[in-house]
Every structure is written in structure tokens, then in C-alpha cells.
Amino acid sequence: MASSTKEMGPGMRQDTLDDFFGDWNWRKITNLRHTMLRKIKDALPELSEHEVALDDLKEGLKEEYSEALSRWKEEVEAWECDPSQPNPYEQSIESDKAGLGIHATDTQVGKLVQRSNNLQHQIEAWVKVQELYMPMVTALRRDKSNNVITPKSFQLLLPSQVGRTATYDLKFQTIEWKL
């Protein structure tokens, strides 16, 4: 419509755009039944595919995750029935988003997720280094955690934190002191 209205005055342009958008919305509403029927026909075959994929996922999960899966399923169903409930799909991002404020942009949230993923990879690299050079820390970490490594709950277990409970090379104390 831009090329058709570019030489019109402001009033005529506004009336023409209003007529165009009104016509577009009327056509959209009158064709809604055909659109919804087409979408339902497309969705029904995919329903069985998604049910098979969910069953495969359930079988692939270990016994220890079945409780978490059922809890997550309950959260999803509660959210679908009442949208005021916390959204289980955005829960991890929303909890990290608290520091950004209520008007965070998608770019800011994306950068936050990217930084969180980067931190997660660095933590996993640190765990591998500790397993190699400080093997006793692995046993301590297993005792203190539930084997889930998240940036918020992770303890670095530096030489000063471990103390005399683990054996390690003294150069690690020097490195920690420099850091």
C-alpha cells in the first residue's frame, strides 16, 4: 500500500489504509474456518509422531529421572490449564532474568543465556581438570551434590576450600593465590 498512498494527503492516506486493513481483517475472519480446518488436518498426523517421540524419550530416560519427568509434566499441565502459573518452558531463563528487570529485551535474554552456557562449559572443563590433578575432589563433589552441575549451585572446591581432606600438588595453592 505504500506505493499507492505515498502521494496522498494525510487524511486521504489514513482513510485508504483504514479501508485496506479493514478489508484484510474481514477476509481473514471469513477464511478462518478454512485455515483452522487445514491446520487441524496438518496437526493430527503429527500428534502420533510426537506421542511416539515422547514414549521413546520416556524409555531412554533412566529411572532416576522419571520422578523429575512426571513433576515437569504436572507443571506443564498446570500451566496449560492456568496461564498465571509459572511457565515451565521459561523457568530457567526467567530465574536468571531477574537481574535484568521486567523490560528485558530478547537480545539481553539471549546474551544472558549465551553467557550462562559459556559458564557451564567452563565449569565442566574445570571439573575435568580437577578429576585429572585432584582426584579426591571428585569424591568430595559426589558427596556434596546430586550430580547435577549448574552454575548457581556449583562449588569450585579450590585448594583452600578442600583443605587437608584431599591430596594435591602445592602449585595449585600458588595458582589460587595468584587468582
Image: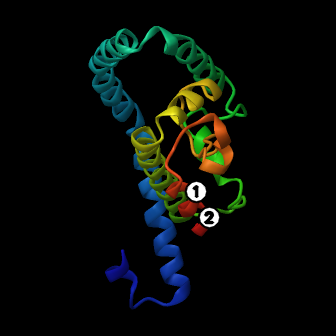
> Which residue is at the front of the view, 65 or 28?
65
Q: Quadrant of residue 90?
A: top right
Q: Which mark is residue 141?
A: none
For the image shown, how many numbered marks are present on the structure?
A: 2
Q: Which residue is mark 1?
A: 173
Above or below for 148 versus 17? above
Above or below for 144 versus 109? above
User: x, y (%) of residue 98?
Assistant: 71, 53
Secondary structure found at label 1: helix
Q: Dot 2: few (<14), some (14–19), or many (≥20) neighbours within 10 Å?
A: few
Question: Label 2 is placed on what type of residue?
Answer: Trp
> Which residue is at the front of the view, 79 or 73?
73
Q: Do tag 1 and tag 2 residues touch (Cβ < 8 Å)?
A: yes
User: x, y (%) of residue 22?
Assistant: 49, 58
Q: Residue at x 56, y 84 (%)?
A: 11
Q: Which residue is mark 2?
A: 177
Secondary structure found at label 2: helix
> Which residue is at the front of the view, 140 or 95?
140
68 lies left or right of 103: left
- Separation of residues labelled 1 and 2 (CA atoms): 6 Å
